[in-house]
Structures are given as C-alpha cells and as structure tokens.
C-alpha cells in the first residue's frame, strides 16, 4: 500500500508540469519518495506547503504536508525547506496516510489563514513580456527580506480572492496579523529602453505605505537593480537618500525652425536649438522656446516630465507671439526704469504706472520703480513667452529722515538738470530765429544799395520815378534796421539762455 501511495502521489504531482505563468516563483521540489519536479511555490501555511500548476489546462493548487518533502529549492539553488527544517519526523504512518494531500480549486479563501508575525510578499504586477523579470525580482526581494530574519511568505493576489485592489489586500493582511506587506509593479518608462520598478512597503498598523521608484534599463534590469543602493536600502527599511548627479538627467530639444533660445521657466537662456543640456530636476518643468528675427518674435512653451537617469526628448513648433508686460504699483504714478542700476539724473523713464509695455525679448528682466516719498524698488521677473506677464508692486514709504533728505537733494539736482537741459535746448530757437531776421535784414540792405546805384544815374534825376525810388530806398533801410535789431536781440537772448542752461547743467 505504501508503494502504491507514493506511485499515486508521484503521478498527481507529475501532472503539475510547469507552464510559463506568473502565478508564483519557480522552485525545484524533491519528495521523500524520490520524485523531483519543477513547480510554482505559493507559500506555506502552518505545516502545509501550497504549490500550483496545471491539470488538464486548468490552474490548480495542491497542498502537501511539510513531511512529504525532502527539500524545496528556489531557482538560485537556495534551500527553502528541508526535512530537518520541517520539524516533523518522517514515519511510516505519515508516508502512508492517504489524506496527507489534497487538490483544491484556485479560489481558496484567505479568511481562515493566520498570517500573524509574517511579512507578506505579493508578486509584482507587470506586462506579459516582463513575466520572467517579475519572477526574478520577486526572488531577489524575498532573499533580501529573509536575510533580515523576517518570516517572509509569498502569496498570489488570487489568495486574497475577495480583494480587487492593493488597498484591500493591505487591509486584509493587517486583519490576519501580518506585520508588513510588500507589493509593486513593473511599468514601461517614457522611453522604450527603460522600465520603472515601483515598490510599496506597508508596515502595520501604519496606514500609509512607503514608496520608491527605480528606473532600470530594459536590456540589463537585474544588473541595474543590484547596483542600485536606493532599492537595497528600501528593502532593509533604512532611510533612502535621493542622490542626484550633475548631468545624470538630460533634455534634448528640437524646434521648427531651428536656432531658438531655450530656457526653463523663470531662468535665463540655456542654449540654441537643436541642443541638449543636463538638469538636476526630477519632476515636471516648463520649457520656453523663443526666436527673434526681423523685429518679429516666434515662440512656444511646453511642460515636460524629466526621466531620471535618461534623456527626455522634446520638440517645439514655434508660432508668432507678442509678449506683453502689465505693471501696476501701489500707489500709482511710479516712474519705471529698465535695469537695476541706480537712477542717474540723466536717465529717462519708460513711463509711469500703470503701464503696458510690449517687448521683443522674453526671459529674465529687471525693472526699477521710483516715486517721491518711497524707496526705490527693484523687481527681477521673467517675461513669459506665451502669456501676459503681470507685475503688481507695493512701494515702501520712506521713514528715515536721512533717506528723505538724500532723496530731496537728488530731486533738486534732477530738477536743475531738467531745467538746464530744457533751457539749453530752448536756446536754439531764438538763435535760429535771430539768424533768419539777420539774413532778411541783409537782403533789405542789398536791395536798398541797388536802388541807390540807380538813383545816382543822371537820367532819372528830378523825375517822378526818382522820388518813388528814394522813398523805397528809405523804407528798405528802415526795415533792414528793424530786422537787424530783432536778430541781434534774439542772438543775445539765445546766448543768455545758453549761459543759464549750462550753468544749471554743470
């Protein structure tokens, strides 16, 4: 009977020839009867080992007592269970008991299972093409956790048959007495040559799990993982320090047309397209592209997600833009000066607030706002490419007596300079007008001389025409004298104004 039982057990167990299915990690099983078989290890509950496999194309679980096994090894050759570790003696009775194993349907309920003091490991969710990688990562994770003397058990999601999501599995594990739950997923990154491993660690009774994301190469994921200190520290429940290397993350930008300036929102220009640059950013950033040609501006903006340890590629199609700055101060009426340099008495403002300015160059800019009785306010801001830039500034009143006196002194100097410049410039008008009157007087004198030459001829003496020419000659001389006097007065006025203006200026 004993030999018949082992034969039947061997036949049933041999029917669990393993198909490539992500139900559980692959193990090599050796029974006390001498049978060796590859199977899927679904966990151990008390003194029972749960294995999985296919019988007539139906996935089925099989439960065997620990005493039926000589040993169980994982794919790396590590011993998961041996006859010495089972804590049970292999006797004739246990070998021949027909009820020592049972085949059950895969819809087993977890309600009657006690997970007290155990660390539960759930296989990673993944795409079909990442099945083998998922099994390998599960094995590695289990090995690291067991090295910490944690009683780790692997349970499929089907074990929690009443749960549809990880939150439910987490809650159920807590209720069944587990001390921790590990789960996660493997998802494709933005680029085809990268994968992202997301791990989640729940420690009960804490409700909020800890999470990390690890970017792996799709070609050498295991090598990348073994080199990744972040993953290992997380599994060992130690503080994970985010390390950022300069140049570790890259962005490559192309624009149509090429030659556009590229800047991160709020920063100065980085390069001209097509170009690439390194960044320490790890999340989302806004990139601006702008291109200035023939007094026209082209540009665009886009929000991108940085891919850690990889190159993020972005392409801009530029369009016509018309950046605008709207400036308002409290109180109104502040003079606006470009730049942050101190205001000189010769510098002219762009206008007074409120003010709208058109600009042909986005990017970083600086403005100084001045108003009598208030401190000078310098504002550094970023001129948006595709949006209106709005500045609202509250001016700070002057309260320091010395500062007030210095401002009044500067205002007086500014006024003197203004009037000096105004008077000096105005001196040109009387000078030009005086020159015109002087020229006209000269023309009158020349005409009077011509008439005088005519009068000196004997042929017209004492005639009617003679008297008419004499009167005209006198009028021309009189007009010339008046115009000359006016021109001379205007020259004198111009010289006086120039002298006053220069005095005020210097």
Image: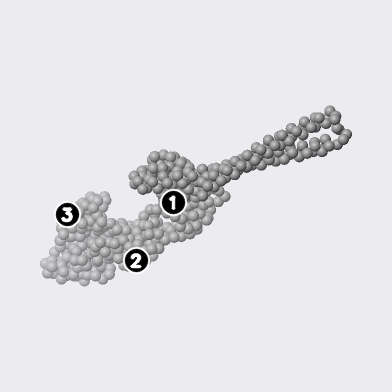
How packed is label 2: few (under 14 Cα within 10 Å), some, or many (20 or more)? Answer: some
* Residue shown at the point (87%, 35%) measured from the top left: 458
Q: Are marks 2 and 3 in contact (CB under 8 Å)?
A: no
Residue 445 spot, x, y in % from top left: 74, 38
* Residue shown at the point (53%, 51%) measured from the top left: 292
Q: Which residue position holds label 2?
A: 224
**Nearer the observer, 261 or 440:** 440
CA gap, disc 2 and disc 3: 35 Å
Residue 38 spot, x, y in % from top left: 27, 66
* Residue shown at the point (51%, 54%) measured from the top left: 260
Residue 417 spot, x, y in % from top left: 50, 46
How packed is label 1: few (under 14 Cα within 10 Å), some, or many (20 or more)? Answer: few
As drawn, the residue found furthest toward the front would be 462
**Nearer the observer, 33 or 374:** 374
* Residue shown at the point (34%, 66%) measured from the top left: 224
Judging from the image, what secondary structure is the residue with disc 2 in?
Answer: helix
How packed is label 3: few (under 14 Cα within 10 Å), some, or many (20 or more)? Answer: some
Q: Nearer the viewer, mark 3 or mark 1?
A: 1
Q: Are marks 1 and 2 in contact (CB under 8 Å)?
A: no
Q: Which residue position holds label 1?
A: 342
Q: Nearer the viewer, mark 2 or mark 3?
A: 2
CA gap, disc 1 and disc 2: 55 Å
Residue 176 marker:
3
Quadrant in which the N terminus is drawn: bottom left
Q: Are marks 3 and 1 in contact (CB under 8 Å)?
A: no
**Nearer the observer, 244 or 485:** 485
Q: Is residue 247 left or right of residue 26?
A: right
Judging from the image, what secondary structure is the residue with disc 1 in?
Answer: loop
Q: Earlier in the sequence, mark 2 or mark 3?
A: 3
């Amino acid at each position: 009977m004993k030999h018949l039982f082992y034969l039947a057990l061997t036949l049933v167990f041999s029917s669990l020839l393993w198909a490539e299915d992500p139900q559980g990690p692959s193990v090599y099983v050796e029974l006390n009867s001498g049978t060796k078989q590859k199977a899927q290890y679904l966990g151990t509950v008390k003194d029972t080992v749960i294995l999985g496999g296919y019988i007539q194309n139906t996935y089925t679980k099989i439960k065997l007592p620990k005493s039926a096994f000589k040993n169980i090894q994982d794919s790396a050759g590590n011993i998961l269970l041996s006859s010495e570790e089972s804590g049970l003696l292999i006797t004739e009775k246990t070998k021949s008991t027909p009820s020592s194993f049972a085949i059950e349907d895969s819809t087993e309920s977890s309600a009657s299972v006690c997970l007290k003091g155990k660390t539960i490991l759930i296989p990673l969710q993944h795409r079909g093409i990442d099945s083998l990688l998922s099994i390998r990562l599960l094995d590695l994770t289990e090995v690291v956790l067991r090295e910490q003397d944690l009683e780790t058990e692997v349970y499929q999601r089907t074990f929690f048959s009443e749960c549809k999501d990880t939150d439910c599995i987490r809650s159920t594990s807590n209720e069944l007495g587990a001390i921790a739950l590990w789960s996660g997923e493997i998802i494709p990154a933005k680029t085809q040559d990268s994968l992202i491993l997301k791990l989640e660690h729940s420690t009960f009774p804490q409700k909020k799990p800890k999470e990390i994301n690890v970017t792996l190469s799709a070609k050498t994921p295991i090598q990348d993982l073994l080199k990744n200190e972040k993953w290992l520290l997380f599994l060992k429940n130690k503080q994970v320090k985010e390390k950022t290397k300069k140049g570790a993350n890259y962005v490559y930008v192309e624009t149509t047309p090429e030659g556009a300036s590229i800047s991160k929102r709020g920063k100065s220009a980085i390069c001209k397209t097509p170009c690439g640059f390194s960044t320490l950013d790890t999340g989302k950033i806004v990139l601006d592209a702008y291109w200035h040609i023939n007094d026209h501006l082209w540009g665009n903006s886009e929000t991108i997600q940085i891919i850690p340890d990889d190159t993020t590629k972005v392409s801009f199609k530029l369009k016509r833009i018309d950046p605008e700055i709207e400036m308002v101060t409290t109180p109104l009426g502040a003079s606006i000066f470009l730049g942050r340099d101190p205001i000189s008495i010769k510098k002219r403002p762009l206008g007074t607030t409120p003010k709208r300015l058109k600009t042909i160059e986005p990017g970083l800019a600086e403005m100084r706002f001045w108003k009598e009785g208030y401190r000078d306010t310098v504002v550094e801001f970023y001129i948006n490419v595709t949006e209106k830039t709005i500045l609202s500034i509250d001016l700070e009143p002057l309260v320091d007596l010395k500062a007030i006196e210095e401002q009044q002194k500067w205002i007086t100097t500014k006024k003197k300079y203004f009037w000096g410049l105004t008077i000096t410039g105005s001196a040109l008008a009387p000078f030009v007008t005086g020159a015109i009157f002087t020229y006209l007087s000269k023309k009158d004198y020349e005409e009077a001389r011509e008439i005088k030459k005519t009068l000196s001829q004997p042929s017209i003496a004492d005639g009617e025409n003679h008297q008419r020419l004499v009167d005209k000659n006198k009028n021309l001389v009189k007009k010339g004298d008046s115009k000359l006097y006016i021109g001379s007065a205007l020259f004198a006025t111009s010289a006086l104004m120039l002298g006053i203006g220069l005095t005020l200026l210097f």
